[in-house]
Amino acid sequence: MVALQKRALPNGSLTLTSLGLGTSPLGGCGVPVSFETFEAVILKAYEQGVRYFDVAPLYGLGKSEHFLGHVLRVHGLRPDVVVSTKAGRLLKPASRSKRAESLYGINWVDPLPFVDEYDYSYDGIMRSFEDSQQRLGLDHIDILFLHDVSGVWHQEKYPLYLGQLRESGYRACDELRRSGAVKAIGLGVNETASVLEVAAEFDLDCSLVAGRYTLLNHAPLTDFFPEARRRGIGIIAGGVYNSGILAEGSQGNALTRTYDYQTAPDSIVRRVKALEAVCERHNVVLAHAASQFVYAHPAVTSVVQGALTTSHVEQNVALISAPIPQAFWMDLRSKGLIPEEAPLPDQGSLALSG
C-alpha cells in the first residue's frame, strides 16, 4: 500500500489524496462494465490508498452513482473517503424524454433507462442533489460540482444556463453548503474561463477542471492558477493526458492518439515526440511525468484519473507516487518543453511507503 500525499481544500473543509478515482469509465463509457468489475476497481483503489471518488449522474445515466454508493456502504468505506458528484443534469425516463445535446457524444454501454436534461435552476439543482443522494444512499455528499457550466460546452445556450444559475441556482448551492448537506461547491468543466466567470459572482470552494494544465498546456500558469489561489479555489485536475496522447504517446493509433478528444494535430505530435525523447534518456514513462507534473502545482488539490481494471488502478497510483529523477525535469526545462515558472515535483513528499 502507498500512503498517498494529501492536500486540503483552501477552505479547510476537506482533505483529498493526491490521486482520486473518476468513475466515468466505470459507467460503461464505450465498453461494458459489470458490477463485479466496478466493485473490484473501487476496492483496489481503496487498498492502494485512494480516498477520493468522483461520480456524476451522467456516468452510466445513474449507474455509477448506484454502484459506488453500494460498494461504499457494503464495505463500510464511507467514513474514510471523500465523495463528489455533480448537478446540472436531471435524469428522465428514456421512453418519455429527449436526451440533452452534448458537445461530445458519449456511448454509454448498458446504461440505466434514462436520458439527461440540463437544468441549473434552484429546483433543478435541488432535485439533482436529492436524486444523487438517493442513488448513492448517502445522507450528505462532500463536494457538489455544477456539471458543464461552460461556454465551450453549451455554446449559444450558455447565457441561458448561466442565467438560470444567476436567477436561482446559486441560491440552491448556497443553501446546500450552509446546511451542511455539502461541504464544498465548485464547477466540473473542461475549460477555465467559466470557473473565473462564476467565481466573480458566487463563492466557489474548488473546481474539477479537465485537460487545461498538462505537459502540453501551460496557459493556467499565467492567469488561471494565480487567480484561483487568490480566490481560494482548490483545483482538482482531470484529463492530465489531454484525452489520450500523453498516455499512448506519439505512436498510438488514430483512436487513442487524441488531443482534447480530437485527432492530435501534427504540432502536438511533434511536441510529444520531443517529450518522449527526454523520457527515453532518463528511463521515465511519459504518463508518469504527465501525472506528477500536474500535481506539482500547489493550486492543484488532487489529480483524478479513471480506471477500468484493478491493474489500471495500481498503475495510476505508481505513476503519481514513484520518484522521477530531478535531472529529467531540468532537461525538460532546458529544452523549453516546460516553462521555467512551472513548479516541479517534490519527490520526497509525493508518497510515503505504508
Image (spheres, rainbow, N blue to C red):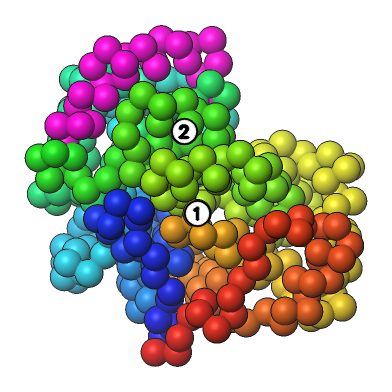
N-terminal-most mark, 1 or 2? 2
| Marks 1/2: CA–CA distance | 14 Å
Residue 256, above or below 203? below
Residue 286, by quadrant, is: bottom right
Instruction: Give the structural element (helix, strand or loop) at label 2.
Output: helix
Residue matched to label 1: 299
The residue located at (70%, 46%) in the rendering is: 217
Indicate the position of residue 10 as horizontal and vertical percent values: 35, 53
Q: Which mark is residue 44?
A: none
The answer to whether residue 297 is above or below residue 31 is below
Residue 93: tell me if it is visible. no
- Residue 175 is inside the magenta segment: yes
Q: Quadrant of the N terminus?
A: bottom left
Quarter the C terminus occupies: bottom left
Q: Which range is magenta?
A: 153-176
Q: Tell me where residue 136 appears, x and y as whole percent.
A: 20, 49
Evaluate if marks 1 and 2 touch, with contact meaning CB atoms under 8 Å apart. Answer: no
Pick whichever, 127 or 185, lies toward us. Answer: 185
Q: Secondary structure at mark 1?
A: loop
Q: Is residue 259 left or right of residue 13?
A: right
**Membership of 107 in magenta stretch:** no
